[in-house]
Image (tube, rainbow, N blue to C red):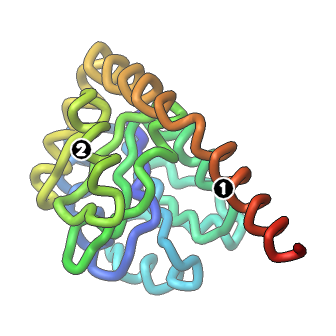
Amino acid sequence: RPCWVAASTHPGEESIVLDAHRRLAPKRAGLLTILVPRHPNRGAALAELAGAIATTRRSLGAPPPAEGVWIADTLGELGLWYRLGMAALVGRSLIPPGGGQNPLEPARLGCPVAAGPFMDNFAEMARELEAAGALNRVADSAALANWLGTIFDDPTHRGAMGAAALAAAAGYEHLAEATATVLLDLLARRRA
């Protein structure tokens, strides 16, 4: 069924995500939006914000609704959500001041990525993913819904974006080792 992830969202962004869901739902039976707030303690407030949209909460042990929004108000499961979704929006990017969240997380799992216009914290990375065809910029709920519609309706496009995401993310595989090397060097200097 059509399923997507709105990851690490911040206050104000969820209204945009829910509006995109409302725009998509009439033409997509079984649509599931997995809403992952950056701060899980906001789960109850987000369920209330969803209004008439069928909503369940992961933190309460509820399975996803047959159609609607599954609020993933838990920690440590973002990789699972990216694997379940056909596409992902990285949060903290839709409204100012923004800054963005890490777009490599979904890209590493072959998940097509969308981001809003405010990706200053990951500007270079977002530009590289966008140039590779792995990331699409969206400015509002209409643009987000249009992009998701294409992702759901065109498996070839979805597959190409996913493959581009994997390829672009591979260029960053050295980061974990490089970071560990720097940290170990700093620790050694501190002990000396």
Q: Is residue 35 above or below residue 150?
A: below
Q: Any mark on residue 113, and which? A: none
Residue 32 visible in the picture: no
Q: Report the front residue among 103 and 155.
A: 103
Dot 2: element: helix
Left or right? Give the position of 113 relative to 176. Answer: left
Among all residues in the image, which is located at the extreme right? 191
First in residue order: circle 2 vs circle 1: 1
Q: Which residue is mark 2?
A: 127
User: Under tag 1, what secondary structure?
Assistant: loop
Query: Are circles 2 and 1 on residues that touch, CB within 8 Å?
Result: no
Residue 8 visible to the viewer:
yes
Q: Which residue is mark 1?
A: 77
Q: Residue at x 67, y 71 (%)?
A: 59
Outermost residue toward the top in this view: 156
In which quadrant of the rendered image does the N terminus lie? top left
Q: Quadrant of residue 6?
A: bottom left
Report x, y in % for residue 98: 27, 73
* Quarter of image, res 53: bottom left
Residue at the spot 51% in from the left edge and 65% down from the top edge: 71
The outermost residue toward the front is 192
Residue 192 x %, y %: 88, 73
What residue is shown at x 54% (from left), y 34% (from top)?
109
Q: Is 153 above or below relative to 27? A: above
